[in-house]
Amino acid sequence: NGKHFLVWQVRLGSDRTAIVYTTENYRPLVVIILLAIAAIVIYFVFRSPIVVKKSIANVGMSEGGISEAKIVVRVKNRSPSQIISIEVMDNVPHIAHVEKELSIGSMQPHAILKHPKKGVVIKWSIDNLEAGDERVLSYKMKSRLPILGEFSLPAANARCTIGNKVIITNSNRVSIGG
């Protein structure tokens, strides 16, 4: 009647009985668990020792659009050892410029350069960052004209040398408005 059944042809012994054994195969489960553990170990061995997060605070509005915003870049050392000589760079598109501002609790930019393709490039130099420490870098961006709709900012990046290896870490991209 459209149903499927699993059937065995069994020869019964002289006492008209048959012995049936079932076994469970746990090898695929063990292999999956070992692969998951190996993936976690590989992640922790090869992950970047620096974490860079970018966020927006204090968005100013004028004439129905975005006129200014404070950009905050957080750089954290998640390795168990000190990292020296970290260079952090962020870009601001041509539609905006960086305003000189003295902000308490955050590092000031080392250099603010104009780039023909990238817009304004902001550089910070961090001499050393102890294990678990975090630095807050911020600047105020002011647009030349009010920005209507959504405005996306490129990712910031941090570059350092550990041993003979150059490590580059990118932050998240952030959007203003929407």
Image (cartoon, helix red, strand yellow):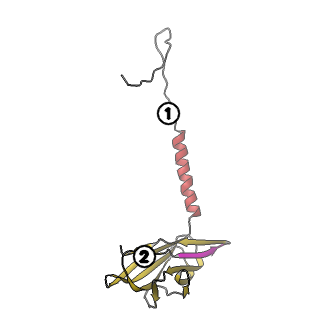
Magenta residues?
157-163
Q: Which element is circle 2 on?
A: strand
Q: Is residue 150 left or right of residue 107?
A: left
Question: Observer-nearest residue: 98 or 178?
Answer: 178
> Which structural element holds mark 1?
loop
How far is the residue under mark 1 from the one under mark 2?
52 Å
User: Which quadrant holds the N terminus?
Assistant: top left
Q: Is residue 5 above or below residue 175?
A: above
Tags 1 and 2 touching, CB below 8 Å: no
Q: Residue at x 56, y 64 (%)?
A: 47
- Amino acid bearing label 2: Ser
Quarter of the C terminus within the rendering: bottom left
Verify whether residue 162 appears in magenta: yes
In the displayed structure, 30 sits above or below 95; it is: above
Which residue does the numbered mark 1 point to in the structure image?
A: 24
Whether the magenta-drawn stretch holds residue 44 is answered as: no
* Residue position marked by numbered label 2 in the rendering: 55
Rendered image quadrant of residue 66: bottom left
Indicate which disc residue 54 carries.
none
Residue at 58% over, 58% down: 42
Q: Amino acid at mark 1?
A: Glu
